[in-house]
Amino acid sequence: MSHRADIFIAAQRILPKHALSRMIGRVAESQRPWLKNILIKRAIAAFNINMQEAKSDNLDDYDSFNTFFTRALKDEARPIHADSNSVVCPADGVVSQAGNISKNKILQAKGIDYSVDRILGNSVEANHYHDGSFATIYLSPKDYHRVHMPISGKLLRTRYIPGELFSVNDQTAQNLSGLFARNERLICEFESDLAGQFSVIFVGAMLVAGIETVWGGFEQPGPGAVREQDLSDQSLSYAKGDEIGRFKFGSTIVLLFGKDTVRGLDALLPQSPVSMGQCIGLLN
């Protein structure tokens, strides 16, 4: 670990990350026009946000900074790869890591891995992904922050696991063991006719004011008990490319697929940019 990374991670350990995130969340939800417009303008400048692809570039159309941050894009901005066998990227961002799950381990960074059991919080469900494949996509503050289905599927259950709120940027991922299995996360388990069971995992991070899903709304962050919901008796089916949720600040999505169901994820290069809807793999 470099000296700079050591200081950065040490500072995160002592910060009141949940309290800080809640405070930032309240500011980001403010509907005071002068405040939210200042925040939006500064974010556009600081992160070089492309407003030409946003459905609206008029700041008056956004009630709060969070409304802006989770803005919709123009219909043609993110075409969904049309091949029936394609697996599409669920979000804009960069590839953190992707490839095969080996001996129940997911690669986080060079020399660092974590177990499927730990990120799912369920060793029985982890059996579905023995020798399977994964992709980890990091969303930076400049990115489109809505999350979409990588393939078509029916929602079976969700599991919210409270945890830390470390930054999920590359510097932290390269130096903090088990980062994605330490942070709070929402595991969404789906069933697909073409690929069996797969998971889309929303990983929270420092300053993330919350995770939202289209079926459950806002997931209140913070310490507490694991919250699990069996939704298999509901008709919650989504087509490839359908929106399923959103982040209110930069964070990470982890995709998990079973053995021999998806090929090509190992061709994704770390730190390569990806866009929602582009093909990142193929169904077997």
Image (tube, grey):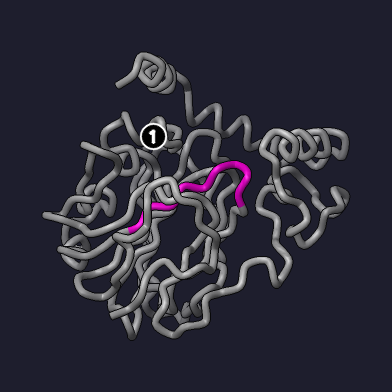
Q: Quadrant for the N terminus, please.
A: top left
Asked where in the image residue 46 lies, by quadrant, the reply is top right
**Residue 2: % across, % down:** 34, 18
**Residue 140: % across, % down:** 55, 43
Residue 243 magenta: no
Res 244 seen here: no
Front residue (pair 152, 173): 173
Circle 1 packing at 10 Å, graded few (<14), some (14-19), many (20+), is many
Whether residue 72 sits left or right of residue 199 in the image: it is right
Front residue (pair 217, 197): 197
Whether residue 216 sits left or right of residue 229 in the image: it is right
Q: Which residue is mark 1?
A: 164
Disc 1 secondary structure class: loop
Residue located at (38% from left, 47% from top): 270
Asked where in the image residue 75 lies, by quadrant, the reply is bottom right
Residue 142 magenta: yes
* Magenta-tinted stretch: 135-143
**Residue 98: % across, % down:** 32, 55
